[in-house]
Amino acid sequence: MSTLEEDGIAVFNDQGKQVQHITSNNVAGVDVRYGITASDGHKIDIAAVALVDENAFAFYQIDSNSNKPLHKIGQFSASIKLEGVCLAKNITTGDVYVNGFSAEGDWVQFKLKYDGKAIHSAIENDGQPLPVRSTKVGGKLSACVVDDGTSTLYLAEQNLGIWEYGADPEDVKERNLLDVTKPIGHIREIESIDIAYQKDGKGLIIVADQQEGFLLYDRGSKAFLNQFNIDGIEEAKLVTVSNNGLWIGNTELDNPIYQTLSFQALAKLGLAHTQYEQSAEWLNNAELKTSDLKMVKASGETDQVNKGGDAADDPALWYNQTQPEQSLIIATNKKGGLLAYDLHGKEVQYIKGSKVNNVDVRQNIKGEDGRLYDIAAASNRTLNTIALYAITPYATKNDSSDNKLMSILEVVGKNRHNEAPEITSSMEDIYGLCMGQSPEGVPYVFINSKNGAIEQWKITVNNNKATGTLVRTLKVSSQPEGCVVDDRTQKLYVGEEDVAIWEFDATEQGSSEATLFASVDGDHLVDDIEGLTIYQTEKQNLLLASSQGNNTYAAFDLNNQGKFISHFAIIGDDSKGVDGTSDTDGIHAASYNLGSDYPQGVFIAQDFYNLSDQYQPLNQNFKIVDWQDIQAILK
């Protein structure tokens, strides 16, 4: 299908014969996505166009079996003067977005909802469609396309270059340039862009440039590959990828020119020396899938941290044994302190201090004075120390006494830092931390450094003061962070971010040799490996890892030699005004019965790109998932 500017939309069959003509006022740009799903599971394929004179998007259902394949099923205002349109589909969540741009450099993005009859904006304000993103890109914009496989949006600033953005509203990383104008780059005047997909992340980015012809870029590396021209097309205005090859042409002539170029012919145009051989298998975006990935919705979230940027990092849980529903989420703000939240996500305490990075908790620690202590330990990157905190059992935010939920547990002895009552590490640039407890009840802190070193500290408590004794050191080859101890089996698991998860003996007298547990494989584990946690019951023993490179969480069965079970993503729930997670650092799982909301426990994950219920950016926070929802997808 093609837009004909002031002459509407033309639909062609695979032989190039026009089968439908929808007359309309000025129309610009058209894009297609497959398998748009309603709440009842009904799926359709859709096309979106930009209605230039109405500053609106129009949506059509596609029925390839009909003699009139396009049937209009929706329209809403774009809030800008539209010049073009492109669709995006998150192949992890199934969410679909429409992007629009203006010639003046404006870009807007709306999330779509299909109610079984029509397409609407999923997010509204007083009944009006509300963008989930909007920004001023720069100069005159002329084209856009989304690579659903890599979740990348390409926006063409016609006489400057092609910008890369994250395609999802939670992916707000810094934009990059794919290419710029000559003499630095290869382009002059961009008119159209499309993606030709192959398996395993391979493929082509194809650009129609009015003066330079057609330009080819490697989809994976983004490297420029080649430029070619086609006889009969003096000005390249259009490039569209079909199942059999490319549709190319000049749509702005009184009698528009269209030609087809097969993938076999494309491979001969200077590409035979690359991976794009004539026999390569090409895909459309309906065939882009994430193999066996499962999805769970966030059940709740914490308040945002009080610092912007990369601030929230690692959560843990303190279990209130007498009132489980009043248990606490303990979490770090690495720009200045330690936080406590209730299970509804409300902040109940903030201990302002140094840059605490990771945190962990152990309870019912028997002190030398015979008393029981609940302790949180955190890595302090400002002083390269271990900070210890006492958690007061059964205190609540409504407690009228002077007791606080958490208070600093003073460190004494020779390993106390000279500037703070904390344990001094001999390592430089400390990073991750976790706690363990021996069968005899002795607590330990494992802390690691960016150079791969790991220290194990024995903690002793007496009369509300603590001492730390270094008992041994371990090592991985490159930067670790996430770690967790299985107290039941006395195993320590360490995530070497770009390489693997390693298993160590966690006992004080144990071997210091590491055993490979699971490697970064680009599928189940995609670097960076960040947080590690264990969900443990009488029957289950699961190791979970935050796979930051693809925004997922991998689950391994520790009762079955670490066998991989499944991986899942946390998605948002618009009905609750909660977004999903992305670029997660720390995670924590707990199997306690925490009351009616979380009878089988929770999974807590840091969210790098936190959004409001109106999809406005907020400071980072932590998402809470009912473990029952995760358990259902692990079966």
Image (cartoon, rainbow, N blue to C red):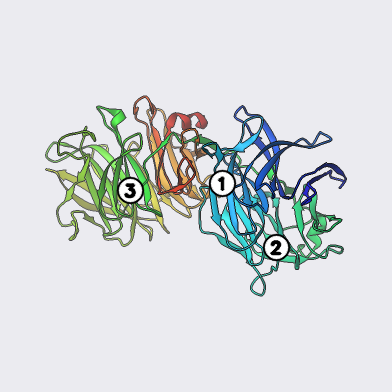
* Residue 232 visible here: yes
Residue 184: horizontal and vertical position, in percent?
64, 73
Which residue is rendered at x = 24% and y = 53% of the image?
Answer: 470
As helix, strand or loop, the secondary structure at mark 2 comes to strand
Taking the image as shown, residue 500 lies to the left or right of residue 402, namely: right
Count of numbered tags? 3
User: 179 or 558, which is in the foreground?
Assistant: 179
Give the alpha-carbon distance from disc 1 to disc 2, as whole Å.
35 Å
Label 3 neighbour load within 10 Å: few <14, some 14-19, many 20+ = many
* Residue assigned mark 1: 523
Residue at the disc numbered 2? 190
Q: Amino acid at mark 3?
A: Thr
Q: Is residue 122 above or below residue 263?
A: above
Are circles 1 and 3 on residues that touch, CB within 8 Å? no
Amino acid marked by disc 1: Asp
Q: For residue 340, which quarter of the picture?
A: top left
Front one among 156 and 609: 156
Whether residue 260 is situated above or below residue 72 in the rendered picture? below
The residue lying at 62 percent from left, 59 percent from top is: 104
Name the amino acid type tagged 2: Ile
Disc 3 designates what residue?
Answer: 332
